[in-house]
Image (tube, helix red, strand yellow):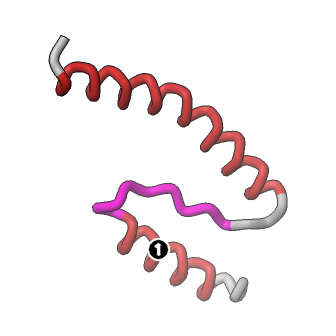
Amino acid sequence: MDNDAWRTAYEAAAGTQTQPQRRRTSDQLTRHGVHVVDATPDTLAPALADAYLALKAAGRL
């Protein structure tokens, strides 16, 4: 197996292990009243802006 194949396999395994922890953390934060924005790096800026505007419109800021 070459280095690229090992790296791909490692990243897939790490992602599989990380996803449930992210979901648990997000759920815990949400239960405590935190608005969680879960987005990829390329969609983070508009997701944050949308969340901000929604919170502002709801009077939660």
Residue 52 percent coordinates (x, y): 54, 81
Kindly identify the residue that appears in the image at 60 percent across and 86 percent down: 57
Kindly identify the residue that appears in the image at 37 percent across and 55 percent down: 40
Q: Quadrant of residue 17?
A: top right
Name the main secondary structure of what is drawn in magenta: loop
Q: Circle 1 sits in a helix, a strand or a loop, which is it?
A: helix
- Relative to 28, say whether 20 is above or below: above
> Which stretch did the figure color magenta?
35-43
- Check the picture and name the quadrant holding the N terminus: top left
Q: Quadrant of residue 24?
A: top right
Q: How many marks?
A: 1
- Relative to 33, say whether 18 is above or below: above
Q: Which residue is mark 1?
A: 48
Residue 19 percent coordinates (x, y): 54, 35
Q: Identify which residue, 53 or 40, lies in the foreground.
A: 40
The residue furthest top is 1
| Residue type at the position of mark 1 | Leu
Q: Is residue 40 magenta?
A: yes
